[in-house]
Image: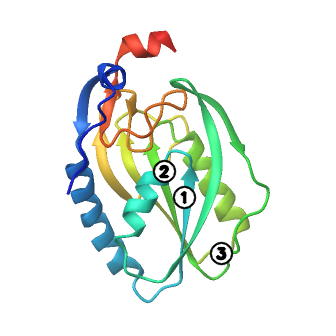
Amino acid sequence: MSRLPPTNPAMLADISKVLYHESTILSRLDELAHTLTEEYRGKDLTCVAILNGSFIFMADLLRRIPLPLQVDCWSVSSYHGTTSSGQVNFRQTQLADVRGRHVLILDDILDSGVTLRAIHDRLAAESGALSLKICVLLRKQIGQARPIDADYVGFDIPNEFVVGYGLDYNEHYRNLPFIGVISEAAIARG
């Protein structure tokens, strides 16, 4: 059963429109989980989740995949406010041991491509993984600064700044149970 949206009127007032309600997101995760279960059945799988944005997506998706798997979480950032700094900061120095395993990178959104390209390239160069694929909840329909594509996509979205379901603006709105577009007024307030 779907939860009710938060009752905090200030948070809701900062959302100009809802793109995907929780029930729609969870239905799409059921479909992605089915595809991933078939893809990785009988394979040694490690999921590398990119924090902080993907934590809700990761938890809800992985609970739907009935396979033995390992999980590693990387804290990586490239955003300040609504724009990418172009610099990717890895907050840990050691990679999980994924030699001889299949790796699935889980991230909340693919937009500029800067963060996912850096993560993909680092894993490809240093990990010894058998395969390396990317699964994102959202793919923004824009040109990418560092082209990379996702192998699995929850939803394609327009070029708008979105929050909720783990995605944030200045570390706020992650706990909204839906994905919505933040208003220009909320962005202007910072």
Q: Tell me the mark number nearer the camera, choosing from 3 and 2.
A: 2
Q: Residues within 10 Å of mark 2 (few under 14, many from 20)?
A: many
- Give the colour scheme of this rendering: rainbow
Picture layout, residue 99 above or below residue 23: below
Q: Quadrant of the N terminus?
A: bottom left
**Neighbourhood count class around disc 1 (C-alpha, 10 Å): few under 14, some 14–19, many 20 upward:** many
In the picture provided, is 108 more to the left or to the right than 83? left
Q: Earlier in the sequence, mark 1 or mark 3?
A: 1
Amino acid at the residue labelled 1: Ala
Q: Which residue is mark 1?
A: 49
Q: Position of residue 49 (x, y in %)?
A: 54, 58
Q: What separation in Å lies between label 1 and label 3 (alpha carbons)?
A: 14 Å
Q: Amino acid at mark 3?
A: Val
CA gap between label 3 and label 2 equals 20 Å
The answer to which image quadrant residue 14 occupies is: top left
For mark 2, what is the residue? 54
Q: Amino acid at mark 2?
A: Ser
Is the Cβ of the residue at disc 1 closer than 8 Å to that at disc 3?
no
Residue 124 shown left or right of residue 157 in the figure: right
Q: Which residue is mark 3?
A: 98
Asked whether 153 or 182 is in front, the reply is 182
Q: Residue furthest right?
A: 93
Q: Position of residue 96 (x, y in %)?
A: 69, 69
Q: Nearer the viewer, residue 20 or 119?
A: 20
Q: Looking at this view, name the residue that lies furthest to the front.
A: 7
Where residue 74 sits, quadrant-wise, is: bottom right
Q: Residues within 10 Å of mark 3 (few under 14, many from 20)?
A: many
1 and 2 marks in contact (CB < 8 Å):
yes
Could you tell me residue 31's position as x and y percent? 24, 65
